Amino acid sequence: MADDPLPFDELVAHARETRVVVVGGGIGGLVAALECAKIGMQVTVFEASDRLGGLVRSADVAGLTLDVGAESYATRGGHVRRLVEELGLADEIVAPLPGGAWLAGLPGAAPLPKGGVLGIPENPFTDDVRAIIGWRGAWRAYADRLRPVLTIGEERSLGRLVRRRMGDRVLDRLVAPVTSGVYSADPDDIDVELAAPGLNAALTNAGSLSGAVAALARSRAEAPGSAVEGISGGMSRLVDALGARLVELGADIQVETPVEAIVPTAEPGVKPGWTVRTAEGDLNAEQVIVACSESAARALLAGLIGPADSDRVAPRVHVVTLVVDAPDLDGAPRGTGVLTVPGSHRAKALTHSSAKWPWLGEAAAVGHPHRHVVRVSFGTQSEAPATDGLGRDDATTLALAEASALLGVRLDATHLVGSDIARYEQTLPGAAIGQREAAAAVRATLSKVPGIVAVGAWLSGTGLAQVVPDARAQSEVLRRATLFGSAPASE
Ligand SMILES: Cc1cc2nc3c(=O)[nH]c(=O)nc-3n(C[C@H](O)[C@H](O)[C@H](O)COP(=O)(O)OP(=O)(O)OC[C@H]3O[C@@H](n4cnc5c(N)ncnc54)[C@H](O)[C@@H]3O)c2cc1C
């Protein structure tokens, strides 16, 4: 149209002439690839392993397709839900049963107290909190109300803040199990403001940590909807749907094709850009999206961003999934799962998946009324997985013993129907102290390099609710740079 401010035909043609290579087919890479394919760019995804999804992984065990990596997404911001809806899976969105989890290693076990933030209680004298920290711990925590208000500055370390205000018992028995189970990290290493945005400000207003937790918990309770959701049939359906949509849009997806190097294109007559090297040969691209784990990304971008700080060690996590026939689990004796007090057990957490997700409970029970699915997780930042060096059989035996102790139910090889072990190198949580600054430094450096962006949990923070919007934002940076020539800027 003559009066159109933008030359659409030219833009469309330009998009179609642009080749984008995405290195890594996890959720970050697939979402970024989708955003580029949508506007007609020629997209190639190289994935090192034999399947897409990265840490969103499934395994077939005893006839069931089970999530053995991520099993849900946070509803925060609505980003993942929008993606799920866009991919036609809106009717498959499910909420977990609100059964609640337990805490083990006190000694004994008790239900995790309701309410609170990151395990920090609003009121240390309620029966459920006192059952865990005892009268001594409750009185020490109450001292928080009597201590002088924190007026100067903010406490950055969650562990230090809780220890100072409420004492060791709240920290060790309520907060550490949560940070270890959720972030695989010690509370001392967690940044308060990133893990619980608003807590520091509420502390200044309320004058005590318990008052701040109450205010924050109230505001969260007013926000509609459950904190996490899943997909009936498992999160791997999201990966399948992303892969299928990419193929529909003409993207080329190559699995079992690790990228070995990314170097500036230096061929006469070829457009400036990047040459992406795999064992299959070289591919020239105007734009590259690096979407692998931190260690792989830093190796590929070594000339640009350098290595990670040696003191920032990513936690290794192993997940052993057990399918068992066990009538004693029918009543879900530990609700949806168990967190452990660090150091008390060899496992760090357990999820009774078939009790947590009704669709899975129903699928497991078809023809086997007492069949259950249980996931046992090992390893944190400060503790190597107890399953290290064990083959599947030995890891399964250890996981059965841990599950038995954590669930308070006898479980052994006679109950076992099938098992799987998945081993991961997890990214440091985005809420780890220093992680955000390290990510910002990488983004600042890359923003000066034309034609390359990087996405993924090591830059956005862990969890799909962070990876998905960040991958979209970075693709937009790349699209703008391609179509309008605006300098890539860090978002
Ligand atoms: C056990 C576990 C449970 C979790 N549970 C949840 C949960 O319930 N909810 C939630 O939101 N999050 C969860 N997370 C976190 C979430 O899964 C991740 O934050 C997210 O999936 C990371 O996506 P990504 O694309 O950044 O990276 P990845 O998933 O790690 O993808 C990177 C991909 O790059 C590929 N790659 C690496 N090197 C190369 C190379 N040289 N060439 C080509 N490809 C390469 C890898 O094979 C991989 O497929 C969990 C994580 C783990 C480990």
Image (cartoon, rainbow, N blue to C red):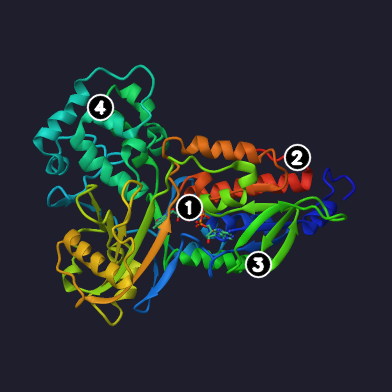
Q: Is residue 204 visible?
A: yes
Residue type for callout 1? Leu
Secondary element under disc 4, as helix, strand or loop, is helix
Separation of marks 1 and 3 at Cα, in angstroms:
30 Å
> What amino acid is at disc 2?
Ser
Q: Secondary structure at mark 2?
A: loop
Could you give the CA–CA distance between mark 1 and mark 2, rounded to whole angstroms?
28 Å
Q: Which residue is mark 1?
A: 464
N-terminal-most mark, 2 or 3: 3
Q: Is mark 1 within 8 Å of ligand 1?
A: yes
Query: Callout 3, which amino acid?
Result: Ala
Percent coordinates x, y for residue 218 in the rendering: 32, 36
Q: Determine if the C-beta at disc 2 is less than 8 A from ligand 1.
A: no
Task: Write down the residue under mark 4.
Answer: 164
Residue labelled with disc 3: 279
Name the residue nearer the viewer: 478 or 90.
478
- Looking at the rendered structure, the number of numbered marks drawn on it comes to 4
Is ligand 1 less than 8 Å from the beta carbon at label 3?
no
Location of residue 401 with respect to 20 vertically, above or below? below
Instruction: Look at discs 2 and 3 and give the one toward the viewer.
Output: 3
Mark 2 to mark 3 CA distance (whole Å): 34 Å
- Which residue is the site of mark 2? 486
